Amino acid sequence: METTGLIQFDWSYVMILINVVILYLIMKKYFFAKIRGFMQKREEEIASSIEQAEQATLQAHTLKQTYEEQIETLEEQGREILKTAKLKAESQARRIVHDAEKQAEEILKHTEAELELQKRKTIEEAREQIAEIAMMAAEKILEKQLHHRDYQVLINHVIDEIGNTKWPN
């Protein structure tokens, strides 16, 4: 080694620099392209995964929103169905009550008519029986005292009186 002045020149530094440049060129030719390709591929895979995750998240959010809307629609339809069923049931109940009232009214009218008819028949039968009893009694009493012609007039008179008599209801 030579010593000349303040700065010393060492060839070992030059050799190290040459070795580093040669090593860099070898690595650039054989390894950097592969490493860069691997890094780029890995970067693309990561970007693709992130994009797929974002799309999946967006799709999941969209599906969730769609399902929530469908659930809300179904709940609304359910409420409408219940409301309609309730209204129909109330209407049917009113109709059944109305029909039952109408039927009861008809039965009552029919029963009243039957009772009135039965009452008239009973009154008529009672009149006939009373007339017969009166005729029999009058016949017994008058048989000995009246002639046939007078007997007929008396019977007609009794029947007319009985017919005009107002019977209690």
Image: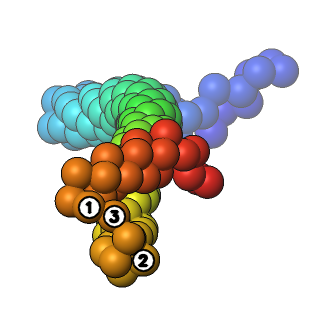
Q: Is label 2 in contact with label 1 (beta carbons under 8 Å)?
A: no
Residue 20 location (% of width, % of height): 41, 35
| Residue that label 1 marks | 147
| Residue that label 2 marks | 141
Query: What whole-number distance in Å separates the C-alpha atoms at marks 3 and 1?
Result: 4 Å
| Residue that label 3 marks | 146
Q: Residue at x 31, y 52 (%)?
A: 150
Helix, strand or loop under label 1: loop
Which amino acid type corresponds to the residue marked 2 in the rendered image? Ile
- In the rendered structure, the answer to whether residue 15 lies left or right of residue 146 reads right
Residue 81 vs residue 77, the one in the foreground? 81
Q: Is label 3 in contact with label 2 (beta carbons under 8 Å)?
A: no
Q: Residue at x 42, y 77 (%)?
A: 141
Which amino acid type corresponds to the residue marked 3 in the rendered image? Leu
Q: Residue at x 55, y 34 (%)?
A: 13
- In the rendered structure, the answer to whether residue 42 lies left or right of residue 75 reads left
Mark 3 crowdedness (10 Å alpha carbons): few <14, some 14-19, many ≥20 = few
